[in-house]
């Protein structure tokens, strides 16, 4: 199968694992170029991973051989960058969040549909060994009929005023619902299907932060916390299951958990932010059974969603980490926030197809099924 050439826009911290995997793990992909508003960052990544070309964003988008462009820019820039990529005639794969508003999300999907191009979106941890094994167990009836789910993601608060641009972490985009909840919501949609109704709560422990770092240009100023950092939600799935999600960035450390409750057992999943991790089933007699992986990619395999999309482009099948799922996750997120403000249940306006699971028994690097 012919390789698919890709380019990367945005060469910050997260780009390292993407470039490593896309250039070394997935044979379908060839990283042809990278670009960043800070050229030195792009040059550094190119040298680190043997990327042949460093160029401007405009030059990357004008390259006729590049078919997929990966958007690793800051959250609020994603819609505009993604529209520019699509207008250049390229398929786009973007980091989460897909967008911060419904209008921005819809504009990207409408443009892609008009131009007959594909949209992919992180997280692709759902394609890892852990969550694919969980999907296999649910589909084969290992816990009976799944009727409920519970997700918990607690993280340290973003209050380190010594961190450059720390105030950005107090705004929408890097808040728990837009930043971390996509791992859990995407996992739940992959495991249980789409959501039809949500209710939510959103608060803050601290309304503002006074900058105490003497080296900060904001020293002595009081910075408002404009995004809710303590959130909770109830989700009603289209299949009748009910889920809960607690997502906060007010904790003293990192606490993740995802559990699926069935009529014949409880499935303790791995951390949805990871590709692997322990998976257990609690049986009706109370015993805990450690479950072996049914699928590969237990290590950090960020980029697997891009590789799956590349195979899908070549074969014509749907890709799994797709824009419709990402749009539905944004609908869930915005619904939670709207419910918190209006104090009522919110019926969602979107749905999506539950992505197909990866086949069992694929060799490492294979995804063409």
Image (cartoon, helix red, strand yellow):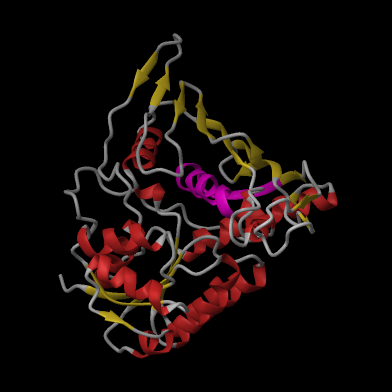
Most extreme residue toward the front, as rendered? 214
Task: Give how far across and how far down residue 167 sits, in percent.
Answer: 68, 59
Q: Residue at x 19, y 72 (%)?
A: 3
Quadrant housing residue 14: bottom left
Task: Please tell me in which quadrant of the rendered image residue 312 appears.
Answer: bottom left
Residue 121: say if magenta: no
The answer to whether residue 38 is left or right of residue 201 is left
Q: Is residue 183 magenta?
A: yes
Residue 348 appears in the figure: no
Q: Nearer the viewer, residue 277 or 234?
A: 277
Q: Is residue 10 above or below residue 340?
A: below
Which picture quadrant has residue 51?
Answer: bottom left
Spot occupied by residue 294 in the image (x, y as percentages of width and height): 27, 36
151 or 173, which lies in front? 173
Residue furthest out toward the top: 285
Please provide the residue range marked out in magenta. Answer: 179-198
Q: Is residue 42 left or right of residue 180?
A: left
Q: Main secondary structure of the magenta part?
A: helix
Residue 89 visible in the picture: yes
Note whether 348 is above or below 33 in the view shown: above
Quarter in which the N terminus is drawn:
bottom left
**Whole-percent x, y for residue 86 in the image:** 45, 82
Q: Residue at 39% x, 36% y: name it.
A: 134
At x 55% / y 47%, what residue is drawn?
Answer: 185
Residue sitting nearer the eye, 198 or 85? 85
């Amino acid at each position: 199968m012919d390789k698919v050439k890709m380019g990367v826009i945005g060469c910050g911290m997260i780009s390292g694992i993407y470039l490593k995997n896309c250039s070394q793990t997935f044979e379908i992909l060839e990283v042809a170029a990278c670009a960043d508003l800070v050229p030195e960052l792009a040059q550094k990544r190119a040298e680190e991973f043997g990327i042949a070309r460093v160029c401007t964003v405009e030059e990357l988008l004008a390259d006729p051989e590049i078919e997929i462009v990966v958007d690793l820019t800051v959250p609020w820039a994603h819609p505009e960058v993604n529209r520019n990529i699509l207008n250049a005639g390229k398929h786009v794969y973007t980091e989460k969040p897909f967008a911060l508003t419904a209008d921005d999300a819809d504009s990207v999907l409408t443009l892609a549909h008009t131009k007959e191009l594909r949209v992919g979106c992180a997280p692709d941890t759902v394609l890892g060994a852990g969550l694919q094994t969980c999907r296999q167990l649910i589909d084969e009836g290992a816990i009976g009929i799944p009727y409920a789910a519970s997700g918990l993601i607690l993280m340290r608060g973003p209050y380190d005023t010594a961190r450059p641009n720390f105030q950005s972490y107090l705004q929408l985009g890097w808040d728990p619902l837009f930043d971390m909840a996509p791992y859990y919501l995407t996992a739940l949609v992959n495991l249980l299907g789409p959501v039809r109704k949500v209710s939510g709560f959103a608060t803050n422990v601290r309304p503002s932060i006074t900058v105490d770092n003497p080296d900060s240009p904001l020293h002595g100023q009081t910075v408002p916390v404009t995004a809710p950092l303590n959130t909770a939600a109830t989700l009603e799935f289209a299949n009748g299951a009910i889920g809960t999600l607690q997502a906060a960035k007010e904790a003293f450390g990192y606490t993740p958990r995802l559990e699926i409750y069935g009529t014949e057992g409880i499935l303790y999943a791995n951390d949805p932010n990871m590709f692997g991790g322990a998976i257990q089933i609690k049986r009706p007699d109370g015993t805990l059974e450690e479950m072996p992986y049914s699928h590969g990619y237990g290590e950090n395999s960020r980029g697997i969603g891009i590789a799956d999309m590349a195979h899908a482009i070549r074969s014509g099948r749907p890709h799994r980490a797709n824009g419709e799922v990402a749009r539905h996750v944004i609908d869930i997120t915005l619904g939670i926030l709207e419910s918190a403000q209006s104090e009522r249940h919110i019926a969602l306006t979107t749905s999506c197809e539950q992505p197909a699971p990866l086949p069992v028994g694929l060799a490492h690097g294979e995804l063409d099924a």
